[in-house]
Amino acid sequence: MADKDPNRIKSDTGKPVTRQQRHAVVKMLAEGHDRETIATQLGLTPGQVSAVAAHVTIAEFSVVTACNSDWIFIPAPAAADNQSVAQPLILEGSCQPASILFDPISANVANQDFEAVVIGDCTLSWSGDGSPAPALGGP
């Protein structure tokens, strides 16, 4: 039987993220820690950190309305000189997309990636009818 608790986020192994871990993730994100650091310190995967961030955001705000998108992008860059990373910020109906900035940028920088998190259909019941909203900044 499927787990019906909407507050449970599980890893690929099925082990749930604890309430204490969820609170610590939110606190550390607010303090500006990157997801790899958070994952390492809390015994989670970076993907679980992203899932917690998205889950908390969904629980409190209408992301699709605020961001005009079914997607949130979470920075997942390799560390680099002069790098500044901002997590997506959704507050009171406004949406600030995530970013990876360099000031100054002095050379080519590799592995400056983002992870995409789709919002909605948490029960995996989407039948494929209709199309999702385009990604923020997308086509």
Image (spheres, grey):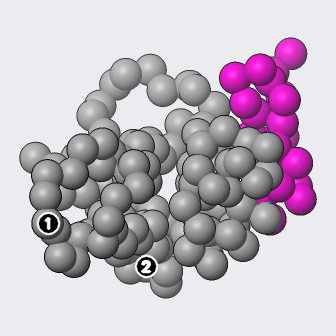
SS label for mark 1: loop
Q: Amino acid at mark 1?
A: Ser
Prevailing secondary structure of the magenta residues: loop
Observer-side mark, 2 or 1, equals 1
Apparent side of residue 71 relative to residue 109 in the rendered image (left or right):
right
Q: Amino acid at mark 2?
A: Gly
Indicate the quadrant containing the N terminus: top left, top right, bottom left or bottom right. top right
Which one is nearer the viewer's eye here, 28 or 26? 28
Apparent side of residue 6 relative to residue 102 in the rendered image (left or right):
right
Q: Image height check: is 15 above or below 57?
A: above
Residue hosting label 1: 106
The answer to if 26 sits in the magenta stretch is: no
Pinpoint residue 101: horizontal percent, then vertical percent. 26, 69
* Residue 93 found in image quarter: bottom left
Pinpoint residue 79: horizontal percent, then vertical percent. 41, 55
Q: Image height check: is 133 above or below 88?
A: above
The answer to if 6 sits in the magenta stretch is: yes
**Residue at 30% from the left image edge and 72% from the top image edge:** 82
**Tags 2 and 1 in contact by the CB under 8 Å rule?**
no
**What are the residue bounds of the magenta stretch?**
1-23
Pinpoint residue 33: horizontal percent, then vertical percent. 59, 68
